[in-house]
Image (cartoon, rainbow, N blue to C red):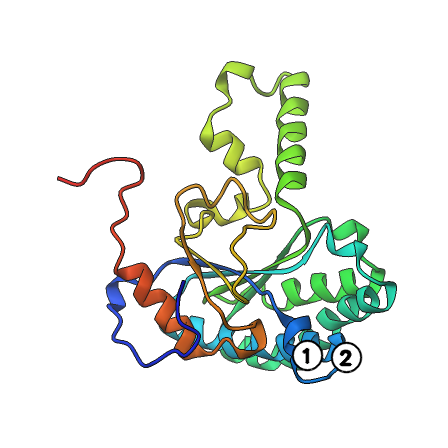
Amino acid sequence: MATSKASKVKLDPARIPAHIAIIMDGNGRWAKRRFFPRVAGHKQGMQNVKTITKAASRLGVKVLTLYAFSTENWKRPGSEVNYLMRLPVDFFNDFMPDLIKENVKVEVMGELDDLPPQTRQASEKAMADTANNTGMILNFALNYGGRDELVHAAQKLAKQVQEGELSPDDIDDRHFANALMTGFLGDLADPDLLIRTSGELRISNFLLWQIAYSELVFVDDYWPDFSPAALETAIAEYQARDRRFGGLKK
């Protein structure tokens, strides 16, 4: 567990994780501690997305995947869900000039067809407006669930087999990975580092296939308090680990 009070650390620029995924947890509890409504925490959390996006981009991260809304989050009160669905609209409208300036490319993965039209349209416009950017990919998991993703990948491969495009014996790790929602990321699809804020120690149905060999770092900070210094501390912890991918180093 990383400490919540992050200090300045020295990072090896040659070993910055190419893909960082973050479970942005604790917005509601952040607000509750301050006697604010939960939506105030979500608003502050979205502001922090801007801060961490810029910090990650400037550190040389190639992909930043953020768990923005899960397939299970629909179970929350309707007023909170409606507010959460409005946030991407406001975020992209407000942050687009900075994304263009930072050369950040936006991607959104998940069951986008099930989103409210305004949310889906804002997401599609953000992807279109940044399609030619060549810097870090800011990948939002929106209406996303890991099990849902695996089911859809299996269905996609089954359809290819049914249509004679693929033999069952040909299905391997590469075929399955390409059928996932992260397939467009190619060799960068699997996060090197997964961070979860708020002190919770679970994965919560996020990138179940992709994090098979990711380094996991859990921090006590609620997401609105997760700072660029805390990001650097998590990366320093990642750099201090010995990644063997199931084998042994000679």
For the residue pair 122 and 78, the one nearer the viewer reads as 78
Kindly identify the residue that appears in the image at 74 percent across and 56 percent down.
Answer: 73
Kindly identify the residue that appears in the image at 36 percent across and 59 percent down.
Answer: 17
The mark that comes first in sequence, 2 or 1, is 1
Q: Is residue 4 above or below residue 134?
A: below
Instruction: Measure the C-alpha gap from mark 2 to mark 1.
Output: 6 Å
Residue 59: percent from left, percent from top: 37, 72
Residue 147: percent from left, percent from top: 64, 39
Residue 64: percent from left, percent from top: 49, 62
State the residue position of label 1.
31
For the residue pair 24 and 130, the one nearer the viewer reads as 24
Whether residue 236 appears in this view of the structure is: yes
Whether residue 60 appears in this view of the structure is: no
Q: Residue furthest left?
A: 250
| Residue count near mark 2 (Cα–Cα under 10 Å), binned few <14, some 14–19, many ≥20 | some
Quarter of the image where one finds residue 83: bottom right
Quarter placement of the C terminus: top left
**Relative side of 223 to 36, left or right:** left
Q: Amino acid at mark 2?
A: Pro
Quarter placement of the N terminus: bottom left
Q: Residue furthest right?
A: 78
Residue 90: percent from left, percent from top: 73, 77
**Relative side of 119 to 69, left or right:** right
Q: Amino acid at mark 1?
A: Ala
Mark number for residue 105? none
Q: Is residue 173 above or below residue 63?
A: above
Residues at marks 2 and 1 touching, judged by CB atoms closer than 8 Å? yes
Mark number for residue 37? 2
